[in-house]
Image (cartoon, helix red, strand yellow):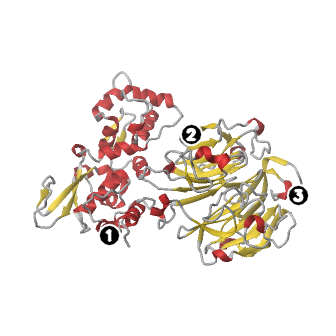
């Protein structure tokens, strides 16, 4: 992948210039961020005053705030982040286990259900125990301004925080609900906005969209400007027709499943030209299919299925058009040059609006570590074991030996000798680092002990990452234990270094790499009784030896690099069906890598 940053920002220069990679930045135009390794970003949410939280897969978080050092957080190793949301000085994290975690700073609204919320600081992520105590599994959560909404146990809606203007949907009673209160059931989806004083949700039976809360500017879309303390039906839409809804300070935007964009609320803030109290189709986007939506306090960003970005609203440069930094109507926004290689790649570009700032980043979807994670936990196709009689764990020899620079026998003696032996949990924690670079804060001392026994540096240096080690492993022909036989022409080949057998040339590769990255090879090995005795296979794709070598290298590096004498159009054509044929992970970035080549060489 490119070494360039994939995260760009635009907004109020006096506040956010500290994020710019260069001192002489061009805010409020799209400006490259100095945030490192931004290709691992999954989602960004922003609070107010200027701070924001970055979710880095799978359970790592980074917090940025002006005039303060970056803070790093990592949830317990068993917790995998599902979503993050924000409002003002509060962030909440939802994990796939249905648990909720909070990151807050002297939370004056006490919208987070922590009994001592006013003691919260950004120093630590704290678990919200309410839901576990009530045996509620949280499926999804959203936040409005000083309010939180939780969809629990599949269809039960709970809310907490400020009920000013009826935004919690429990009547117009004022005051705070420190602990979540039940609202209703049969709810299928929930929507809000970090700067919004209103809330939307969809019910499954009947199939309806509801709104409640502040409606002074008609942002509920119910045909009036009267605040609603109880959920009120939005008449002109069925719930099943809606993709998403998001609200700002005085406006709401709705996108249908067909990609049509509707707006309601105050025109000076949402910019569709006239004030409307019902959701009205935005004419400038009538012919576009919207797929992503984000709203800030006064700005809106919409991304289409063609990766065209539109923005409108008022502020300090959160949506930079070519002519100005504000617009009453949706205006096409030029993307940074770095993004031009990805304009035809679907589901790669991400947008996010915060307070006085907007974000634009790429989700590269590198899947080497994820593929190896799956391979490790599958416990299949291993060729040796480590451990004592009670802790035998199957592993892939080539990977373990290359990452540790030790043989399996050496590892056995150092970790499971007569006088000492690490336990099963320590073994698994060590192997998680070997396979996918995971180092959890839990029991980190025991993991350090394991490294010390092996005489490995702890923590591992930046030169000993999974990505770098696997790239180096590609060059280690001595440890490759498998060969792909590719049919070649009868004429003499210029490359005399390659092994040949009849009219075939052999490409050496590590068996575990093929198993981790390709469903085709996993299926093939599934039908072989003695997998460890299988050391070669014939390729029947009729692809060239040249393109297959490029594909194999991609398996190790997640990138495609062409040599000067290689025909880019030929390679792109040859590998255009590789994702489907070799049954690669559907989130792999091979297609975007091929698209980069097409852009670079101006290929049709």
Between tags 1 and 3, which lies in front? Answer: 1
First-in-chain label (1 vs 3): 3
412 vs 8: above or below: above
| Image location of residue 419, percent across then percent down | 36, 21
Q: Which residue is mark 3?
A: 172
Give me the C-alpha separation between circle 2 and circle 3: 39 Å
Residue 128 visible at all: no
Q: Does dot 1 land on a helix, a strand or a loop? A: helix
- The residue shown at (38%, 23%) is 420
| Image location of residue 451, percent across then percent down | 40, 29
472 vs 529: above or below: above
Q: Does dot 3 land on a helix, a strand or a loop? A: loop
First-in-chain label (2 vs 3): 2
Q: Which residue is mark 2?
A: 76
| Image location of residue 12, percent across then percent down | 67, 51
Give me the C-alpha separation between circle 2 and circle 1: 45 Å
Q: Which residue is mark 1?
A: 573
Residue 77 visible at all: yes
């Amino acid at each position: 992948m490119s070494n360039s940053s994939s995260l760009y920002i635009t907004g109020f220069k006096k506040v956010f210039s500290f994020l710019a990679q260069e001192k002489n930045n061009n805010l409020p135009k799209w400006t490259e961020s100095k945030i490192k390794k931004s290709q691992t970003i999954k989602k960004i949410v922003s609070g107010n005053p200027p701070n924001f939280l970055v979710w880095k897969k799978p359970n790592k978080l980074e917090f940025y705030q002006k005039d303060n050092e970056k803070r790093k957080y990592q949830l317990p190793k068993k917790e995998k982040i599902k979503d993050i949301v924000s409002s003002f000085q509060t962030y909440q994290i939802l994990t796939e286990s249905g648990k909720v975690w909070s990151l807050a700073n002297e939370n004056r609204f006490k919208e987070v259900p922590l009994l001592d919320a006013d003691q919260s600081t950004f120093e630590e992520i704290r678990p919200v125990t309410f839901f576990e105590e009530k045996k509620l599994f949280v499926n999804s959560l959203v936040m409005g301004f000083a309010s939180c909404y939780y969809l629990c146990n599949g269809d039960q809606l709970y809310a907490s925080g400020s009920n000013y203007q009826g935004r919690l949907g429990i009547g117009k009673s004022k005051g705070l609900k420190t602990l979540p209160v039940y609202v209703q059931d049969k709810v299928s989806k929930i929507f809000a906005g970090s700067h919004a004083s209103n809330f939307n949700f969809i019910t499954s039976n009947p199939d309806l969209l509801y709104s409640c809360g502040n409606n002074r500017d008609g942002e509920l879309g119910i045909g009036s400007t009267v605040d609603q303390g109880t959920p009120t039906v939005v008449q002109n839409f069925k719930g099943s027709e809606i993709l998403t809804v998001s609200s700002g300070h005085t406006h709401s935007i709705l996108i249908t499943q067909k990609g049509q964009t509707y707006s309601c609320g105050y025109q000076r803030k949402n910019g569709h030209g006239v004030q409307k109290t019902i959701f009205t189709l935005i004419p400038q986007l009538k012919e576009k299919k919207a797929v992503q939506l984000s709203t800030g306090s006064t700005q809106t960003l919409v991304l289409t299925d063609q990766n065209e970005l539109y923005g409108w609203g008022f502020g300090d440069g959160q949506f930079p058009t070519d002519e100005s930094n504000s617009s009453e109507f949706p205006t096409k926004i030029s993307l940074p040059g770095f993004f031009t290689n990805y304009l035809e790649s679907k589901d790669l570009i991400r947008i996010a609006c915060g307070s006085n700032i907007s974000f634009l980043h790429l989700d590269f979807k590198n899947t080497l570590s994820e593929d190896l994670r799956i391979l490790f936990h599958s416990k299949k196709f291993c060729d040796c074991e480590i451990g004592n009689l009670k802790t035998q764990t199957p592993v892939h020899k080539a990977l373990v030996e290359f990452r540790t620079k030790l043989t399996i026998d050496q590892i056995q003696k150092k970790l499971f000798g007569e006088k000492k032996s690490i336990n099963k949990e320590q073994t698994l924690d060590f192997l998680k680092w070997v396979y996918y670079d995971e180092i959890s804060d839990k029991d980190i001392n025991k993991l350090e002990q394991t490294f010390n026994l092996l005489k490995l540096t702890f923590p591992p240096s930046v030169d000993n990452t999974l990505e770098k080690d696997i790239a180096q492993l590609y060059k280690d022909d001595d440890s490759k234990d498998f060969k792909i036989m590719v049919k070649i022409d009868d004429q003499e080949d210029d490359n005399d270094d390659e092994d040949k057998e009849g009219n075939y040339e052999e490409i050496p590769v590590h068996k575990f790499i093929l198993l981790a990255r390709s469903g085709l090879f996993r299926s093939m090995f599934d039908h072989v009784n003695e997998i460890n005795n299988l050391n070669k296979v014939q390729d029947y794709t009729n692809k060239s030896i040249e393109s297959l070598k490029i594909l194999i290298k991609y398996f190790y590096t997640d990138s495609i690099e062409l040599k000067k004498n290689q025909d880019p159009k030929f390679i792109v054509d040859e590998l255009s069906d590789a994702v489907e044929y070799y049954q690669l992970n559907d989130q792999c970035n091979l297609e975007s890598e091929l698209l980069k080549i097409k852009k670079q060489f101006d290929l049709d």
